[in-house]
Image (cartoon, rainbow, N blue to C red):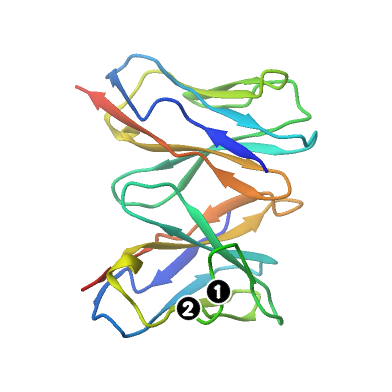
Amino acid sequence: SAVISQKPSRDICQRGTSLTIQCQVDSQVTMMFWYRQQPGQSLTLIATANQGSEATYESGFVIDKFPISRPNLTFSTLTVSNMSPEDSSIYLCSVGAGQGGETQYFGPGTRLLVL
Amino acid sequence: AQTVTQSQPEMSVQEAETVTLSCTYDTSESDYYLFWYKQPPSRQMILVIRQEAYKQQNATENRFSVNFQKAAKSFSLKISDSQLGDAAMYFCAYYGQNFVFGPGTRLSVLP
C-alpha cells in the first residue's frame, strides 16, 4: 500500500476565498483521485487527476470551481475556488494501486470549514 | 450505472461478539472488485478487505471476513470478536469501470 499525506489537515476559510490542498504519495502512481465527503455522507468523486493532462471531472464538478494539478506521478493539488459555506466538507485524495489500479488507498483528508 | 446499497445506517455489537454488515450492489459488469473500507472518527479511510468477483472463495483478513454471493449481488462483512477499536463508519465499495461507494453503516461497539 502507498503512504499518502495531505496538507493542510484542516482549515477555516472565509467565503469568497480559495484554498489549495496538496496530496503527496511516497511512490509513483498512475491514478490519483479527489473525493468530497460532506458531513455524515458517503464519498463523492470529484475528479481523476491525470499526470500531464487535464483532470477528468465527474458530473456536477467543473474545472473553474475545482482546478486540479498533477505535475508528476507523486503529487497533486486540488483548489477549492470562490468558496461558500456549502463547500464545507472533508476532501480526500486517493491513489489507485494493484495491477489495474483497482484498489484505492486514501490520504488522511482535509477538513474544510467555510464561514 | 452501478449502485451500492447498505441497508443498515447504524449497527451495534457487544464487545467480543460477532456482527455482520450488509451490502448489495447492482451492476451489469461481470468483472469487478468489491471492498469494505473503515472510517473511524479520525476520518482516515482504511481498507479492510477486498474481493475479486472472479474468485469464488470468500476473502478473509484476520477477524474480518466476507460472504460474497455473486448471483445475489451481495457482499456482507462479518467482524468476529469485535473490539472497541472497530467502532467506525463502514463503507462498501464497488470498482468496475468506476469506483462507487455505498452510503455507509455506523458501527458502535458496546463495552
Within 10 Å of disc 2 (Cα), the crowding (few <14, some 14-19, many 20+) is some
Residue toward you, B16 or A81: A81
Quadrant where the C terminus of chain A is found in the figure: bottom left
Residue B107 x, y percent position in the rendering: 33, 30
Disc 1, SS? loop
Residue A13 image label: none
Question: Residue sitting at 53 percent across and 80 percent down?
Answer: A67
Mark 1, other Cα within 10 Å: few <14 / some 14–19 / many ≥20 = some
Quick check: A80 left or right of A11?
right
Q: Indicate the chain on which mark 1 is placed.
A: A
Quarter of the figure with residue A22: bottom left
Residue B50, image x and y in percent?
61, 36
**Where does the image place residue A49, in percent across and percent down from the top left?**
62, 71
How many numbered marks does the figure carry?
Answer: 2
Residue placed under numbered mark 2 in the picture: A65
Q: Which residue does the image show at 73% across and 49% down from the upper left?
A: B97
- Disc 2 and disc 1 in contact, CB within 8 angstroms: yes
Q: Residue B61 falls in which quadrant of the image?
A: top right
Whole-percent x, y for residue B4 in the image: 56, 36
Q: Is residue B13 above or below residue A58?
A: above
Instruction: Identify which amino acid the numbered label 2 is placed on.
Output: Lys
Chain where mark 2 sits: A
Q: Which residue position holds label 1?
A: A62
